Image (spheres, helix red, strand yellow):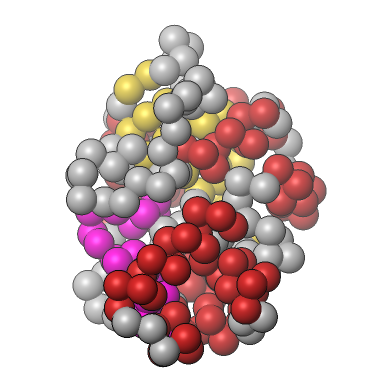
Amino acid sequence: MAHIDSTPISIDAIKTWIFDLDNTIYPAQSRLFDQVRHRMTDYIQQHFSLERNAAKALQRDLFLRHRTTMKGLMIEHGTDPHHFMDYVHDIDLTMLGYDKELDEGIGALSGRKVIFTNGSADHAANILDAYGIKHHFDFTYDIFSADFQPKPEPRTYVDFMNKANIDPASAIMVEDMAINLKPAYDMGVTTLWLDHPDEDVPSEGRMDDISHIHYIADDLKHFLSYTNR
């Protein structure tokens, strides 16, 4: 694990572990999020009668301008967010199964574990159930909890911290999109960025300035193996 901050991570000082979901709980290299991304394209293609490439272009444009495709669809096209989320998260999870290493790695971390995602709580529950690790998490804050204001909207972090009763100074946030760690850092949260080494994995969340990043790891299990050894 790369250390940006010269100070070694103090596990005992961490009272709350904040985990993103997609490409974080499961590794980006699994390509699981490709299914969600493809379902988004399907949804746009069907609802706007577009060719595939045009649907992909609209999907990416909405994401870049609104931080989530769903928010862009809601604002610009009046899309029902519940219908959209139900559709895009209807994915095949048969590739997932109980992960003993992940279960034991998360279980070895002292303190609370919570999920902070731009996806839905139902999607989070499905992923955690599939891995057999749901019992470790006592709180999920999703895009509906955020009133559709996605990460990295700063006020969403304030609302999340308040609702989850988290002291930022004793929390660490684990996230695959560097841009989503900046508001947490500004609140005093320790930050861990999961930087996908695979060039084929989209990296819309990268930033040129990563001075707000304390630690970097390839994926969650890489971090857990380093932390718990």
Q: Is residue 156 above or below residue 224?
A: below
Coordinates of residue 86 in the picture (x, y in percent):
51, 84
Instruction: State the image quarter where residue 128 is shown.
Output: bottom left
Coordinates of residue 52 in the picture (x, y in percent):
30, 78
Residue at 36% across, 69% down: 56
Main SS, magenta residues: helix
Residue at 47% across, 24% down: 209
Counting every numbered tag in the picture gives: 0
Residue 83 shows up from this direction: yes
Question: Horizontally, is 179 left or right of 99 in the view?
Answer: right
Instruction: State the image quarter where residue 121 is shown.
Output: bottom right
Q: Is residue 43 above or below residue 71?
A: below
Q: Quadrant of the N terminus?
A: top left
Question: Horizontally, is 199 left or right of 143 in the view?
Answer: left
Residue 129 shows up from this direction: no
Asked if residue 38 lies in the magenta stretch, the reply is yes
Q: Quadrant of the C terminus?
A: top left
Q: Nearer the viewer, residue 224 or 70?
A: 70
Q: Nearer the viewer, residue 117 or 228?
A: 117
Chain part drawn in magenta: 23-43
Residue at 55% across, 50% down: 113
Residue at 66% across, 80% down: 78
Q: Is residue 71 above or below residue 154?
A: below
Coordinates of residue 54 in the picture (x, y in percent):
36, 73
Asked if residue 87 lies in the magenta stretch, the reply is no
Question: Horizontally, is 221 left or right of 14 in the view?
Answer: left
Q: Nearer the viewer, residue 170 or 29?
A: 29
Instruction: State the image quarter where residue 68 is shown.
Output: bottom right
